[in-house]
Image: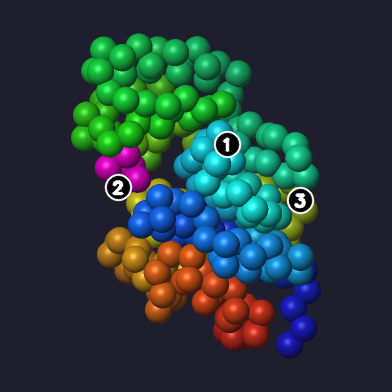
Amino acid sequence: MDIGSNDILVASDYDRTLASEENNFIINEKVAKKINEFSKRFKFIVVTGREKKFIDKLAVGLNPTGWILENGALIIYNNKEYTLCSSDWLDKRERIVKILDQLKVRYSLGKVIIYVDNYGDKVANLKEITEYANIEINRKDVMILPKGIDKGVGVLKFKELIGFSGKIIAIGDSENDHSLFKVADIKIAVANAIPQIKEIADIVTVNPNGLGVIEILDKILSGQIFLNM
């Protein structure tokens, strides 16, 4: 079966999906090479909560079709950036930052996102924050975003941006990949994914992290997955 370049879009998480924690989330050269080759024929996007300043250091040599960063809030395609937030978000974000400062938690600011590192239990259910924002949990961390923004929304916006009309294959490992799976035609969990993600996946890879992604890309290239859509 001949698969056209507009038939498949693979949307993959980064941390613990493409890159392993054991390797400090630095992309493996073998994984990067496979994705780069795959992206010459099909569409492959990285969908992550990471900010660009971090991904630039961790994913050196990785050249997918596009990037969806900050958990869906920032799209990078053809060297152009597209932010998904309302005009009043920065004012709301300033109020949220003051709350975080009072709580004395560690956080990082992206163009849109507030990433709270390892303090999820302190902020996840604060009404003072949920009044203004969407909160996504990612293991022990928390991502604070404009209401209505998540990985799934970012993928749909990317699809609209490039005029894509084919199938979406999503690959993930953790809680914030639920929204990514919601917009996918095929949901794939890597072997090291949390149980909640494995339960809703159509496929669970044999291998963990980037090796699991390579496993899936090889199956797409050989037609094994596409034939079962």
Q: Where does the C terminus fall, quadrant-wise?
A: bottom right
Q: Could you tell me residue 165's position as x and y percent?
A: 73, 61
User: Overall secondary structure of the magenta stretch?
Assistant: strand
The picture quadrant where one finds residue 204 is: bottom left
**What x and y, as percent, mark residue 93?**
45, 18
Give me the residue at 59% from left, 86% from top. Answer: 224
Residue 139: which disc? Answer: 2
- Mark earlier in primary sequence (2, 1): 1
Amino acid residing under circle 2: Arg
Of the two numbered discs 3 and 1 in the rendering, the one whose residue sits closer to the viewer? 1
Q: Earlier in the sequence, mark 2 or mark 3?
A: 2
Is there CB contact under 8 Å for labels 2 and 3? Answer: no
Q: Looking at the picture, which amino acid does disc 1 mark?
A: Lys
Is 7 rendered above or below residue 73?
Answer: below
| Residue 59 screen position, x and y as percent | 57, 49
Q: Residues within 10 Å of mark 2 (few under 14, many from 20)?
A: few
Question: Which of pointers 2 and 1 indicates the residue nearer the eye?
Answer: 1
Badge 1 crowding class, 10 Å Cα cut-off, few under 14, some 14 to 19, many 20 or more, is: some
Who's the residue at 52% across and 77% down the image? Answer: 215
Q: Which residue is mark 1?
A: 52
Mark 2 or 3: in front is 2
Which residue sits at x=60%, y=49%? 60
Disc 2 element: loop
Q: Is residue 140 magenta?
A: yes
Look at the image and give the residue range highlighted in magenta. 137-141
Q: CA distance from mark 2 to mark 3?
A: 32 Å
Q: Is residue 10 magenta?
A: no
- The tag on residue 162 is 3
Q: Give whichever of discs 3 and 1 has the lower sequence position.
A: 1
Q: Is residue 15 left or right of residue 1?
A: left
